[in-house]
Amino acid sequence: MRIPAVFRPGIVWLVALTWPGAVSADFEGHGGAVKGIAVSPDGTTALTASFDYSVMYWSLPDGVPRGRFAGHAGGVNAVAFLPGARQAVSGGDDGALIVWSLPDGGIVRRIAAHAAKVAAIAISPDGRIVASAGWDRSIRLWSLADGRLLHDLTGAADNVNALAFSPDGATLLSGGQDSTIRLWRMPDGVQQLIMPGHDFAVNAVRVTPDGARAVSAGVDETIRVWALSDGRQIDQWYGHAGPVIAVDISADGKLVASGGIDGIVRIWHIASGKLVH
């Protein structure tokens, strides 16, 4: 499972998933709230996005900072490694996407992506496309090779908060302020499914490693599990006092981690819905 980070303003806590759970490192350096995190595929480095307009690059597991990257004209909300971890992409309140060279933090490309803040990004499994979700009610697909706009996905009824590609790259999942999850066909961006169920905004979505199910987190204090074959809701879990703002799935597809505005991270068994920790 990915190593989760627990946030308080300006600090990232790295938690080892051995029980009883304990903070194994804390990374200090940001001057504002941490809004997003990405861990490299080999688990040796991490990137964090912050309200202080910067992206920071860290060694794992010791938390030694490798660099601070400045380039956004606003808070940074999302960051992701490209395959191979030699480049990364971030999205911010300035509506821009920035492609960074790692480890030096040089700007490879800046894309004026949205007319409002970029709330989420997702990288296609082949590393060719970055999807961006904006608070201008749009989802856009961009070529990472040259920064071209490939498709402007139409149909979102409100601002979009979350994105996730399926493992095979054949579909893109989005979650929005309109409380729905939408499934888009790749690479042409045709909308295939609308999944209603949450009572309020959807904050996060993830797809299981086998591509069969999705997990979502909502302002309505729930985590929900969906069948992607037909959009059917399979399960619904309550465990947080307040909105659930983050969710992730273990590499083997057996566990789900959820994080809430209540400051708690909970680990769930996806098949049974049982709260594990």
Image (spheres, rainbow, N blue to C red):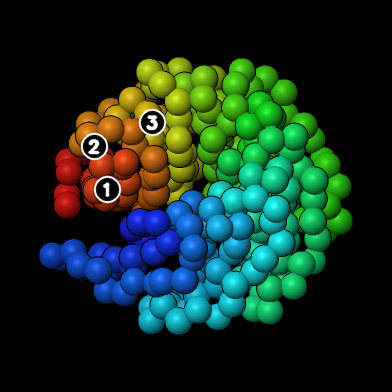
Which residue is more in the foreground, 190 or 28? 28
Helix, strand or loop at label 2? It is loop
The image shows residue 274 at horizontal and vertical percentages of 17, 41
- Residue 240's disc is 2
Q: Hey, what amino acid is under mark 2? A: His
Q: Hey, what amino acid is under mark 1? A: Gly
Q: Residue furthest left?
A: 20
* Residue sitting at x 45%, y 54%: 33
Mark 3 — residue?
218
Label 2, label 1: how far apart the Cα atoms are: 9 Å
Q: Hey, what amino acid is under mark 3? A: Gly
The image shows residue 114 at horizontal and vertical percentages of 74, 38
72 relative to 232 in the view: left or right: right
* Residue sitting at x 51%, y 25%: 177
Check the image and report above or below for 192 versus 76.
Answer: above
The image shows residue 211 at horizontal and vertical percentages of 49, 42
Which residue is more in the foreground, 7 or 204? 7
Which is nearer the N-term, disc 2 or disc 1? Answer: 2
Label 3, label 2: how far apart the Cα atoms are: 10 Å
Image label count: 3
192 relative to 5 in the view: left or right: right
The image shows residue 55 at horizontal and vertical percentages of 59, 64
Helix, strand or loop at label 1? It is loop
Check the image and report above or below for 42 versus 153.
Answer: below
Task: Locate the N terminus and report the quarter of the image it occupies.
Answer: bottom left
- Residue 263's disc is 1
Label 1, label 3: how far apart the Cα atoms are: 15 Å
